[in-house]
Amino acid sequence: MPFNVRPEIQQPVRDMIKEIGPQIQEMGRSEDRKPDSFSFDIFRLLAAKGCVGYVMPKEYGGGGRTALEYATMIEEIAYWDAPSSLLAAVSQLAVDPITRVGTDEQKKAIIPKSAKGELIPAFALTEPNAGSDAANQQTTAEVDGDNYVINGEKIFIMHGDVAHVGVVFVKIQEEGVRDKISSVLVDLNLPGVKKATLMHKMGMKYATTGRLWFDKVRVPKKNLLGEPGKGFKYAMQTLDGARIGIAAQATGISQRALDESVKYSKERIAFGSPIAKLQAIQWMIADMSTKLEASRLLTYKAAALQDAGEKFTVEASQAKLFASEAANFCVDRAMQIHSGYGYIGEFSPIEKLYRDQRVAEIYEGTSEVQRLVIAGNVLRG
Ligand SMILES: Cc1cc2nc3c(=O)[nH]c(=O)nc-3n(C[C@H](O)[C@H](O)[C@H](O)COP(=O)(O)OP(=O)(O)OC[C@H]3O[C@@H](n4cnc5c(N)ncnc54)[C@H](O)[C@@H]3O)c2cc1C
């Protein structure tokens, strides 16, 4: 039974996801066999259940849930099907800065439809030459009367291939903010926008990742999000919260890897008895369960701090770093315990879990970037 910090809050979330768990798992297995394409079926199911708008503000049609409830929900969805947890989470990534600094008009235009899954928003920060070095943005917005004219390219954008609207980070070519980053809401169906699905992704295939090109895209200046020149700060604030989501996703993956391993090791007979009787297997199970528990505690701690309105940047990075590397460890050990029946996908979920897990150590800041954030903060004291 997974540990609950506040059972009265978390148990109903676990019960809610259990109702759709087996279904998303089955749908996910079949989507995973197809070439990479966005699963509208799973996305709609999650939206209908309230998962897509779960933490979006209530006054704009969202669920208004807490960070702890959100982390619990993502963990539970990831347990059944990791890509579905991304399908549930990515709209929130884009809506977060709009919630924080958008105008009432911008919020009304985007949040209610995003919460229902009728509008797909994307968070477009990364560029071919601005990954970990996110400040090295090269997408520009020239000022032309009441419009910005946007030119540039974004890469690795979750749901970017199907998104209707993007929170796009640009450098506005205007005195005073030319070298700073700003954020602009861009209708991704405007002339001059080109979208593509990035193919042959290792895992998380049906929560697709896209590439976006902007060629003289005219956007009204009223689409500026927040203040000019503050976009980098908004992006980093959003990523702080999102990292808790990735930690929760990784925790769900680790729990699944452990549960599958416990079950299998009791059933598989070698040399006349279940492999669970072998100390070599028991040690793997012990290490997996310990890392899993530590992942969960770090994740819940970061979420609880966010809910309390306290600073949580370091704790979110620690949770994301530890939980994503722990998930790598756990799925690797699960593969070893299942051996041939883990490596071949038709026998167990381990092969898919292995592929789905790996990106947790890369997106929303690589493990190295998390270490930079943590060390920087610790050394500053
Ligand atoms: C599936 C997927 C979905 C994504 N979704 C989104 C999204 O929705 N929106 C978005 O904007 N971006 C998204 N990203 C981008 C993601 O955040 C970047 O891939 C990530 O930040 C790393 O950038 P990079 O791939 O360019 O690697 P690089 O920055 O080129 O890094 C290469 C290697 O160098 C290391 N490195 C770089 N700088 C340092 C340093 N200073 N110190 C130590 N090591 C360093 C890195 O850790 C890494 O190991 C997504 C990526 C993937 C794969």
Image: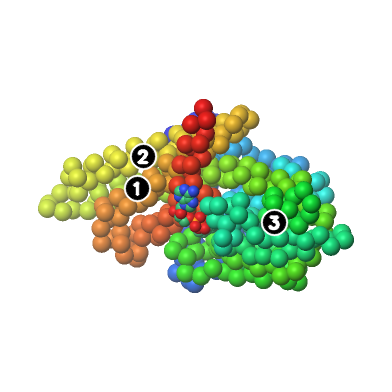
Q: Please tell me which of labels 2 and 3 falls first in the chain.
A: 3
Query: Seen from this angle, which residue lies furthest left?
Result: 271
Q: How far, Cα to Cα, is label 2 from label 1?
A: 8 Å
**Is 107 above or below relative to 159?**
above
Q: Amino acid at mark 3?
A: Val
Which image quarter: residue 220?
bottom right
Mark 1 or 3: in front is: 3
Position of 234 with respect to 41 (left or right) is right
**Which of label 2 and label 3 is nearer to you?**
3
Q: Secondary structure at mark 1?
A: helix
Q: Which residue is mark 3?
A: 170
Q: Judging from the image, what secondary structure is the residue with disc 2 in?
A: helix
Q: Which residue is mark 2?
A: 291
**Image quadrant for the N terminus?**
top left
Circle 2: residue type: Lys
When the figure is inspected, residue 297 is found, relative to residue 201, above or below; the finding is: above
Tell whether label 1 touches label 2 (CB within 8 Å).
Answer: yes
Q: Which residue is found at the position 28% from the left and 43% from the top?
A: 285
Instruction: Give the residue at mark 1.
Output: 330
